[in-house]
Amino acid sequence: MSLAEYGFNVDNGYLEGLLRGFRSGILNKTEYLNLVQCETIDDLKLQLQATDYGNFLQNEPSPIAVSVIDEKLRSRLVVEFRHFRNHAVEPLSTFLDYITYSYMIDNIILLITGTLRQRQIAELRNKCHPLGSFAEMESVNIASTPADLYNAVLVDTPLANYFKSCITQTDLDEVNIEIIRNSLYKAYIEDFYQFCQNIGGATADVMGTILAFEADRRAFIITINSFGTELTADDREKLYPSCGKLYPYGLHQLAKCEDYEQVRQVAETYPEYASIFAGAGNNPGEKTLEDRFFEREVQINMLSFMQQFHFGIFYSYIRLKEQESRNIVWIAECIAQRHRTKIDNYIPIF
Amino acid sequence: SSPCSACVTSMYFRIARYKYYPYQRNTYVIGRQSIIIDFITRYTPNTRFTVPAREMGSILRSEEMMLLQLLLQSDSAYACVRELGEVGKVEFKDLNAEVSAFQRKFVNELRRCDEMERMLRFFVSELEKAGIPIAEPPLNCQAPDPHHLIDLETLFSNDEESLKQLNANQESLRKNLLDLKELKHILDKAQTFFQEGEEVLAEAFVQQQTTAGVVGGAGGGAPAMELRSTDVEAAAAETKFTFLIGVVPTENLLVFTRVLWRVCRGNVFVKHAQIEEPLEDPITGNPVVKSVFILFFQGEQLNARIKKLCDGFRATLYVCPESGPERRQVRDQVGVRIGEVESVLRNTTNVKDVALGKIAQSVEEWQQKVKKIKAIYHAMNMFNLDMGHQSLVAECWCPVRDFQAVQEALNRGTHLSGSPVSAIVNRISTPETPPTYYKVNKFTSGFQAIVESYGVASYRELNPTPYAIVTFPFLFGVMFGDIGHGLMMLILACVLIGFEKKLAKTKEGGEFLSIIFSGRYLLLLMGLFSVYTGIIYNTLYSRTTNVFGSAWRPYY
């Protein structure tokens, strides 16, 4: 009998209660139906006032642009996350920090790409995700090689450990940036997985499922995106995270795939992924593969709320809120551009 | 003739209902339109409605309510609803309940009101930032007519534009001032920096010389070699040490120096000193603590990298002359410029304060007006559009006692809007239970609120409030029971009631004190009963007192 459940509420009871309160404010099917029926963005704003979002758009001068809505949704999530992080103690505080590392990786890659294309640091700063901001972030633009980047900027950040596999690259250019991104992410997700297993209990269980799915999804997407590029099979295999269900045999077979059909055959040997690949495609009436992956992610994240006294709910809440932001922005775009045929392609959560 | 046919059918309805619901008295039959007008102008309610005394509402039972159907002409509808709102005695039924909020008729006007409210909120936040007190609103702000709505809108948007312009000007001036102030601090601190920098360079120079073996045997005891500044400057020119001087927020300073050290692989000399007074951030106006830093390094490549790094950490670099007299000259110039910019800034702030002062006079009044306009349009959204979109049909509950007031309000509305046809009032009988309405005064309202927190009685049911007025404070007194403390409560309540007119106006004190203030009559009664039970308990400030002596008599 694990003793974690008895002591969990001492440190984390308030935050879990608060989080479950926020979770019950996530939009449900009827609210999405109301949103879809809106004719203009002002109607959308009126409908959102009746939800948990309340008056978050009330000080924006009309007409409201969709980018403003996106920004406000994101800043709402950031405020909630900051509150959680400020009130958390170990091990929850490290757990929440791990969640921010993925945004840090995205920010770094964004800044490097932007610098390569000669953009100004000020406009790049606005595009960075606020959850992944750290003090040395903006100085990545001075680095020209990964070794430089590591020595100058990243060695003091928590991402230092993830860089060991990337330093062999010679120069920072477009193709190598993607390889760096994926190697960083692989190291990060394996580290996160190990951390959750060390916590043990329900957290290890729930997060293990979630991170395994994330790892496998990454493997599939990397494989599919690398068709037609000069990425060799060996290089590709080095980028696959090893904490998923596909490890080791599935990953080995994926590395040998040359086209989409072979990938699908590999997926069919695993029952969970077979159902995702079945029926996915780019024809009208079918959902794209990305959409099906999003759906499965939403399902897994919803299930994490069924258990209590674990940290997985924090991760799941952030993922679900991001999905909800994507949904609202999709609906807003469809309304703003008056292209309502695909407006129902959002992914309902509850 | 179309209203006539509607009336005839409704007449049939009512007669049919009369058959099945014989207890619905006080229905009056409506004939043709001329009779209606005749009816309304000739008959006063009191002669028509014989309201028996026992049917009058009181605090013991809720008021008798009736369901009215109003037929309002489109041009006079707004004015009539406004007058009804000022009277405040009707509750409109939502006839468009199945229609969603943004498909109703007056959605556009409501959106415009929301826009105006946003602009008013902006004004209030600007007034708070500038610290200008907001004037009290006049007692009765009537909502303006619909065609005045546009005037208000243009007024607000003009004011908002000019305020935004003034804000932008102020921001740029502040930024200018910040740059000048930073430069001033840099020039002040540069003297100490250069001296220390020179010492370090001198040491490096000495080391170079000794390792190169240039120092000849010019006499023992040479370690205390006198170095003149010209030597050092020559050395500096020879070895090409470049320096960069700038200002960075202190919170970034540590990370900045660390990253700098890493980037230059240790080949940089950094010196920093904090600026004592916090500088004002131009956009938010918050004070930010900053530090001056100076870097000495060699090489052109490092120069480019360090400049990019400074960009990333929001450190601003400045040009500073090397020699002392030049620095003093620039310092004086900067001082003069700071004075100029500050005076321009003061002028701008004055202009802005004048504009804000004008707005502060009327912003509360505007807010109330906009709220009333919104309420009117919300009410009008509940009405049904009659055939031909000529008139609006509304249904509302109204206390029987206040029918006269409603009637007069409608007449005023039609008169003010200049419409030829007056509004038509029908009474509808309905099997629906009317809402419960109590006529409370300032004394009974507190107790009524407490009773209603347990649940609202149904229509014309016995109201527990009159009993609660006595029992609730009595039970409190039984539990409290102290003459002294009860007296204190009593005195507090009397003070609150004595100054209630003045205290009702002040908004400060927060929520807690306003709760106490709104319960002052409750406090009065609780205090009274506490004193009473205190006398029975013989307790004064938790000490027993012997007032009446013992009531025991020996009977033997």
Image (spheres, helix red, strand yellow):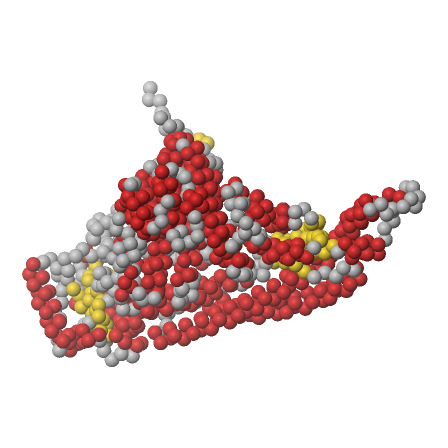
Of A336 and B139, which appears nearest the observer?
Answer: A336
User: Measured along the vertical axis of the image, is residue B388 above or below residue B336?
Assistant: below
User: Measured along the vertical axis of the image, is residue A22 above or below residue B83?
Assistant: above
Measured as percent of width and height from the top left, residue A112 is found at 52, 54
Say which residue appears at 66% left-offset and 56% top-offset. B301
In the displayed structure, does residue B276 sit left or right of residue A188? right
Q: Quadrant of the N terminus of chain A?
A: top left
- Residue B467 visible within the image: no
Say which residue appears at 40% left-offset and 30% top-offset. A4
Of B184 and B74, which appears nearest the observer?
Answer: B184
Of B194 and B416, which appears nearest the observer?
Answer: B194
User: Measured along the vertical axis of the image, is residue A266 above or below residue B36?
Assistant: above
Say which residue appears at 40% left-offset and 38% top-offset. A243
Say which residue appears at 24% left-offset and 67% top-offset. B383
In the displayed structure, does residue B24 sit left or right of residue B538? left
- Residue lying farthest right? B219
In this rendering, the count of numbered labels is 0
- Residue A50 visible within the image: yes
Measured as percent of width and height from the top left, residue A248 is found at 38, 37
Which quarter of the figure has residue B170? bottom right
Measured as percent of width and height from the top left, residue B31 is found at 12, 73
Measured as percent of width and height from the top left, residue B23 is found at 11, 57
